[in-house]
Image: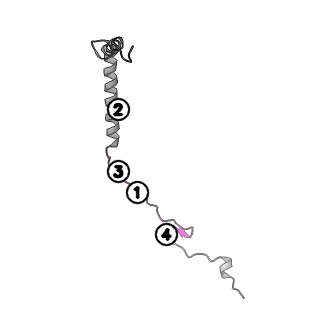
Amino acid sequence: MGSMSLVHWIIVGAVLLVLFGGRGKISDVMGDVAKGIKSFKKGLSDDDAPTAAPRPVEPPRAEPLRSIDQDRNGLREPVARESETRQVG
């Protein structure tokens, strides 16, 4: 017998007929698989499409720090530290 005799071709034809021919459940399954593959490819191509870059978020503006030398009416004279008032020598 050769590598592909008439019996082999009949079996291959029958398998192809079952898978792709007629109104059987298997042909419906194969159609659903094809739709799934198309949907998957479409999803991949949608991911490759460039999207608008998100705007950078501005950091919140910080208020200036208030010193403990400030009171309700404004600035007070800073109090000299003892080490600053000592004279060397």
Proximity of marks 4 and 1: CB atoms separated by less than 8 Å: no
> Whole-percent x and y of residue 65?
51, 65
**Circle 4 — which element?**
loop
Given this view, does label 2 or label 4 mark the residue nearer the observer?
Answer: 2
Question: Mark 1–mark 3 contact, CB under 8 Å?
Answer: no
Please identify the quarter of the rendering in which residue 58 is found: bottom left
**Which residue is more in the foreground, 78 or 57?**
57
Q: CA distance from mark 1 to mark 3?
A: 15 Å
Please name the amino acid that badge 2 sits on: Phe
Q: Which stretch appears magenta? A: 49-73
Give the residue type at disc 1.
Answer: Glu
Q: Residue at image x 31%, y 26%?
A: 35
Per the image, the residue denoted by label 2 is 40
Please identify the residue farthest to the right as the structure is shown: 89
Give neighbour class at mark 3: few <14, some 14-19, many 20+ (Cα, 10 Å): few
Considering depth in this image, is 43 or 13 the residue closer to the camera?
Answer: 13
Which image quarter is the C terminus in? bottom right
Distance Cα–Cα, label 1 vs label 2: 38 Å
State the residue in front, 46 or 72: 46
Label 2 Cα neighbours within 10 Å, binned few <14 / some 14-19 / many ≥20: few
